[in-house]
Image (spheres, coloured by chain):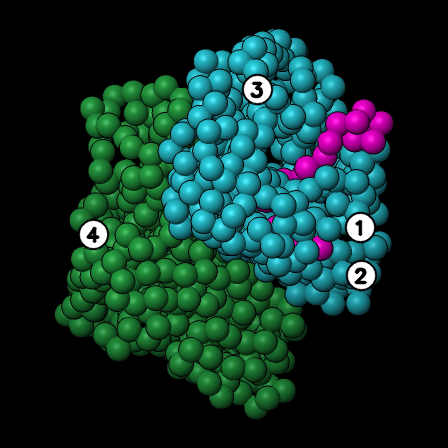
Chain colours: A green, B cyan
Amino acid sequence: MHISELDTPAVLVDLDVMERNLASMAEYSARTGMKLRPHVKTHKIPELALQQVSMGAVGITAAKPSEAQVMAAGGLKDIFIAYPIVSKQKADALLALKDLAKLSVSVDSFDSAECLASASTAIGYDLPILVEIDVGFGRCGVATPELAVDLARKIEKLNGAHFGGLMFYPGHMMVPLEEQNLLLPKVNAAVEAAYAALVKAGLDVPVVSGGSTPMAPRSTEFSHLTEIRPGMYPLNDRNLVAGGFATLENCALTVMTTVVSTAVNDRVILDGGSKTFSSDRLLTGDHLGHGVILADADAVLYGLSEEHGHIDVTNSSRAYKLGERLRVVPNHVCATINMHDTIYGIRGEQVETVWKVAARGRVQ
Amino acid sequence: MHISELDTPAVLVDLDVMERNLASMAEYSARTGMKLRPHVKTHKIPELALQQVSMGAVGITAAKPSEAQVMAAGGLKDIFIAYPIVSKQKADALLALKDLAKLSVSVDSFDSAECLASASTAIGYDLPILVEIDVGFGRCGVATPELAVDLARKIEKLNGAHFGGLMFYPGHMMVPLEEQNLLLPKVNAAVEAAYAALVKAGLDVPVVSGGSTPMAPRSTEFSHLTEIRPGMYPLNDRNLVAGGFATLENCALTVMTTVVSTAVNDRVILDGGSKTFSSDRLLTGDHLGHGVILADADAVLYGLSEEHGHIDVTNSSRAYKLGERLRVVPNHVCATINMHDTIYGIRGEQVETVWKVAARGRVQ
């Protein structure tokens, strides 16, 4: 099927571009020995996760047990939950997957570890629990090496669980290179201090899991790092381009839209708004705009209603026709995919694959 | 079932509050004679739309044909598409519903009218087409009375369609009262000029459709208005409260979340982020914050990751416990509902109804 036969808005993934991105990260992982455990929250598609594993990923990362359920049902056999589970409901839901997948989790509190270990004990599992440390992002993670050691020791004493290593998320490092260079020694100091304290306490640290798409190319500069969890690298987006972490040519995902109104002077209206692109903002610079209109560098997608994209064409030399189609690179690929049930994998302009976003809406 | 048995995040609708909101708008409509045609994009739930109709709404409004499909299948019998349809695909999809529901649409171009009339003719339907005029929002709508008359005349000459009246959306009027008072005469001038020109041209204008939730209480101040299309009034949200259009007590929808981390100093992390609340910003004031935490007026939901809500509790005198549940009024109720497959209608703390958000993701 040609893409012109699809109704719009339609989310397209250029398979040639995606395969290049996948191969590039797989090659980096193989060359450096850095284990790759992609975060599937970006695409929420089991088939894509299987492709990542087939290209060398050691397993996957998910945020929520309900997301893990979809992935396990889809054939993923090694799932790490990079999210604190604090309820029996969620611990039971996760551990119920033990016959489908090897499971592991991270925590930043003993309550969470105890809750997970209790669910694990009940079904005779031995769950690896990693301790999350805060390396400066200020979201989750214990604050000091002493707290990390204390938590690891307590985990080791629990039935149904054992200490599986360290985990961190450098979410504050999606910044220009010179700022990264100032942050990296601080992140490394935090990891090194926790690592040393654990070793001194006689604990083995088999895994140090970190990373993100922006920091993936610098993974070998992180102390003790054994594993990275990038999510966006197969697809990329306007945010990664604006931050200098990708180019427009590396952006595999576009939203194909239709011009539905040109009635207002200097404005063109698309049939995609916040329910198509999400309202996620540009993270850098002026924070303005909602996507890159590939056909017109002078057009500005300045606003979104729920179902309308508002383009300012004041500075455009291009004519716009009702009914014509425009492809847009969205600000945030994870948020855009989460708006849709179906994604189309295309080769050139032919639809080759239709994916169901099976884990869409799996926030529990 | 008690709400404590639900996994989180869970979207709850307080039925007592919602029923009061529904009754209040129904009473206004009955008292003023202003016909009520609620926009279902807010809730995307056919059962709720049926409830609106059972309380006096003349029909419903939808944005996209795929949304209308769900509503027609759910038993809604009068559907107006307040959105320009410019493709044969969408026109055919809409007209295919003619045996289920009375259909009408609005357009701001002759191309759109022609496309719809062609699909209508093919199945022997006579489609009412309203002409959208721009009253100052600058999104869709023809710019002058002359263009409105020209378009209406051309519609009248089409087979399969007839001119159904005027439509506008005063999206720029969600502003403080004194700014509204400055805008209202301009909006009325635009409507009056178009109306007078149409009448002078010998055209009947059976419907003038306008309105929104913020402007609904002032509907009788709009010239020639016969019908309003508010969407959010059954539920309300932080944006409407911040704008002075609702109170927190009128907000029927809350998101029940769980505290999953307190490891970082002065921070509390919830298990809901942008994939639970959406990233829609506060439209007024400082534009900051992502929701109201009902249990703590001093806590600030200052940031959202995809699955984390970041609360600053620096100024809070309240203690936070891992695993405790917090209910949050989101910024934008339409965007929040669109993130979820299931919404729970509650009476007090008991779950009384479980709704499927059947038209979720229906952006085509």
| Residues marked 2 and 1, same chain | yes
For this orientation, the residue located farthest to the bottom is A124
Give, as a single range, the part of the protein colored magenta: B28-47
| Residues marked 1 and 4, same chain | no
Q: Position of A172 compared to A177: left or right?
A: right
Residue B127 is situated, as x and y percent measured from the top left of the image, at 54, 39
Residue B35 in the magenta stretch? The answer is yes
Tell me, yes or no, whether the two marked residues, 2 and 1, touch with CB atoms within 8 Å.
yes
Residue A184 is situated, as x and y percent measured from the top left of the image, at 29, 50
Secondary structure under tag 1 reads helix
**Tag 2 subunit:** B
Q: Disc 3 or 2, which lies upstream in sequence?
A: 3
Residue A185 in the magenta stretch? The answer is no
Task: Quadrant for the C terminus of chain A, please.
Answer: bottom right
Task: Quadrant for the N terminus of chain A, please.
Answer: bottom left
Q: Which residue is mark 3?
A: B203
Q: Nearer the viewer, residue B190 or A257?
A: B190
Q: Which residue is mark 2?
A: B352
**What amino acid type is highlighted by mark number 2?**
Glu
Residue placed at 37% from the left, 66% from the top?
Answer: A355
Q: Which residue is mark 1?
A: B15
| Residues marked 1 and 3, same chain | yes
**Tag 1 subunit:** B
Q: Which residue is mark 4?
A: A250
- Looking at the rendered image, the disc whose residue lies closer to the viewer, 2 or 4, is 2
Q: Position of A6 compared to B216: left or right?
A: left
Q: Nearer the viewer, residue A260 or A165?
A: A260
Looking at the image, residue B140 lies above or below residue B191:
below
Q: Which mark is residue B306?
A: none
**What amino acid type is highlighted by mark number 3?**
Leu
